[in-house]
Amino acid sequence: MKKGLLFTLLFTLALTSKAQNVFRYSQFNFLKSMYNPAALASDARLSADMVYRNQWVGLAGAPTTIGLNVASELTSNMALGVNFCSDKIGLNQSTSVSAMYSYRIVFSDRQYLSLGLGLGADNVIQDLAAASTTMPNDPAFSQSYNMWKLNASFGAYYRSSKGYVGLSVPQLFQQTPRGPESGFTIPRWHYMLIGGYYFELGDNAYFNPNVQIKYTKNAPIQGDFLLRGVVGSVGVSLGYRTENALIAGADFMIGGKLRIGYSFNYGLGSLSRVKGASHEVHLGFGLPYYFSSDTFSGQKFLGKKGKFSRNYQLRYNRSNKLYRVKSRS
């Protein structure tokens, strides 16, 4: 029975490596701009986020993912960023590098709609010749390939003082080596929807539910539902992944500029006995972090003592004031 489950899991891995090319993080609420270029610099004026995910520990060929995103706000309505990701699963390895730009349409000093675009390249390697097969010199595994291809991403992101919602297509081009599904194929797009809301419970505590949904045609809808509570500089998360897995994690803010997070996934189904748990580590820098709400007036972020501060204003207010002065002259 155990061997049958293991075979099923490995077969699923093989299918996933060919059909699913947009991965998901459990700490997606900290990594929004890795999926959506419109969310650049939404958590800090200058930010850097690094993540390492080791999935299904103990299973040979299981996925491992490394991601890096750096973003900077240029003005109150523009931001730039770079994204790097490397994902390895079995004999397949993919690496993507992209530059991203977002433009914000400001409705008021506390809300905006942002549109973003990313442009870069993907490197896809499939080392079939390294596979161990039951039949020597199996022609199906005689060739390997290593290719670079252009890719792009697009997204929209809305932010208010109490919540956010975003929709994106992280990969506009499909990087299959050949066939009708390769290239710019709209029916094969993966759509990522994210959202979250902030409920303030006191001067130094809040409750933050988040949701992430992934959809592509002819595939089951996948989702992550995360409940996060924060007191002071410590956050605790509990959630559920639709592949029948629990999510648990914790994050710590240090000095208002450094955030360390850990997330643990454990499957609840019969395959959990053979595939093991998944671990994810996040390290983020924000100068400064907007702790509970991303607004253009009275930004909130943590000070060194873990307290809310309201002494930070974006250039939005200053530029509007300058514009009014010029208009009167």
Image (spheres, helix red, strand yellow):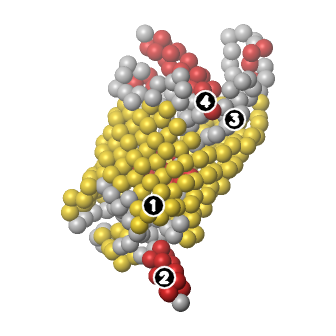
Q: Residue at label 1?
A: 112
Amino acid identity at mark 3: Phe
Amino acid identity at mark 1: Tyr
Q: Position of residue 303 (x, y in %)?
A: 35, 72
- Tell me: residue 69, above or below residue 267: below
Q: Position of residue 254 (x, y in %)?
A: 38, 65
**CB under 8 Å between callouts 4 and 2?**
no
Quarter of the view holding residue 21: top right
Relative depth, front residue between 260 and 168: 168
Q: Tell us which disc is closer to us: 2 or 3.
A: 2
**CB under 8 Å between callouts 4 and 1?**
no
Label 3 secondary element: loop
Q: Earlier in the sequence, mark 2 or mark 3?
A: 3
Q: Mark 4: few, some, or many residues within 10 Å (few <14, many ≥20)? A: many
Gap in angstroms between the C-alphas marked 2 and 3: 46 Å
Q: Mark 3: few, some, or many residues within 10 Å (few <14, many ≥20)? A: some
Relative depth, front residue between 66 and 321: 321
Label 4 secondary element: helix
Relative depth, front residue between 87 and 195: 195
Q: Residue furthest bottom?
A: 329
Q: Tell us which disc is closer to us: 4 or 1.
A: 1
